[in-house]
Image: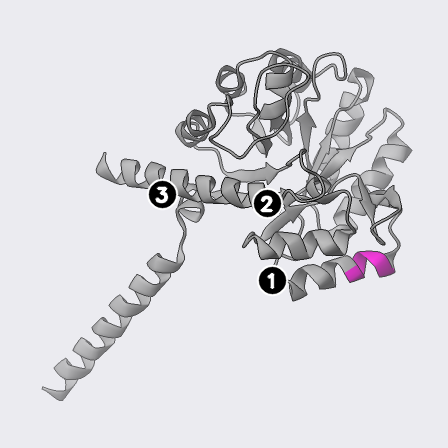
Amino acid sequence: MKKLLLLAVAASLAIGTQAQTSAATSSADQLGWQLAVHSYTFRKFSIFDAIDKTAALGIHSMSISGNVSLDGTNSIGTLTLSEKDQEAILDKLKAAGISPRFVNLGVVQLPADEAKSRKVFEFAKHFGIDTLIAEPATNALDTVAKLCQEYNIRVAIHNHPKGHSIYWNPESVLAAIKGRTPLIGACADVGHWMRSGLNPVACLKHLEGHIICLHFKDLNEMGSAAHDVPWGTGIGQTKALMAELKRQNFHGAFGVEYEYHWDNSSPEIAQCVKFFNAVCDELVAAGQKQ
């Protein structure tokens, strides 16, 4: 009898622990998604303030831009950060309760000159970053592929808008990665697709299987004059984008790169977070019913 009682208690504790673990797992976690603030969102502030602002939003991951400010006034290239400054930034992440590993770095320059590109990969390796975001020239792609394999670091090709990047259209990204290592893929900036007059859902479908991460946005209109709005309030088909990414079994980071109301964007980003979590809940619930 005593043995049965002990077994019953053990089973009860196991069930309780399992329930607690399940409750602590968010819908985004179940989908394999990370919500991460891109530091460029807070480019008018120091990287340390950007970390505090991210923590205040309840977001636990960040990506870092190719340029940062240490004092809130002057901007410097992230690749020029001293080891002391790198350590200070990583310590700040830990103190703020944010993952001490940036999900990616960029946009950075990756030239055809192997020695110059190698310095970028070395920096990423030292800083603990496994994904670089870049828009390499076509003559640099073989060099980039070689370094990706050597360092086991991914390169996500970003799409600035038409007229500003050769990668504005998904077709050009697919051409760049064709026949090369799967460590090269896409950083899908859905906002820039809209600025280029492209349907973001169609673009995601075109890049299926090659999306490494996203700069996720919603805009007030199509075209070059468009600006960011809280997710789900614009013309970006945000819920449909998330449903499509779930269909593709995408696992990775949704980078919050909010490029509007620079001095006080946190209230609008908070709306984005609320929307993101609600849609994640819907997508998980819908999957459980199937």
Q: Which residue is mark 1?
A: 97
Label 3 sits on a secondary structure element that is helix
Q: Which residue is mark 2?
A: 36
**Residue that appears at 66% across and 63% down:** 94
What amino acid does circle 3 point to? Asp
Instruction: Point out the tag, 2 or 3, that comes first from the N-terminus.
Output: 2
Q: Is residue 85 magenta?
A: yes
Q: Which residue in the rendered view is the most extreme toward the left?
A: 1
Crowd rating for badge 2 (residues with CA inside 10 Å; few <14, some 14–19, many 20+): many
Q: Which mark is residue 281?
A: 3
State which quadrant residue 78 falls in: top right
Task: For marks 1 and 3, give the CA distance.
Answer: 24 Å
Label 2 sits on a secondary structure element that is strand
**Residue that appears at 44% across and 48% down:** 29
Q: Is residue 56 magenta?
A: no
CB within 8 Å, label 1 to label 2: no
**Residue that appears at 62% across and 52% down:** 54
Residue 179 visible in the snapshot: no
- The C terminus, quarter of image: top left
Residue 13 visible in the snapshot: yes
What amino acid does circle 1 point to? Gly
Instruction: Point out the tag, 1 or 3, that comes first from the N-terminus.
Output: 1
How many numbered badges does the structure rendering display?
Answer: 3
**Residue 117, percent across and down?**
84, 33
- The N terminus, quarter of image: bottom left
The magenta stretch spans which residues? 84-88
Crowd rating for badge 3 (residues with CA inside 10 Å; few <14, some 14–19, many 20+): some
Residue 2 versus residue 123 in the image, above or below: below
Label 1 sits on a secondary structure element that is loop
233 sits left or right of 143 in the view: left
**Residue 247, percent across and down?**
39, 28
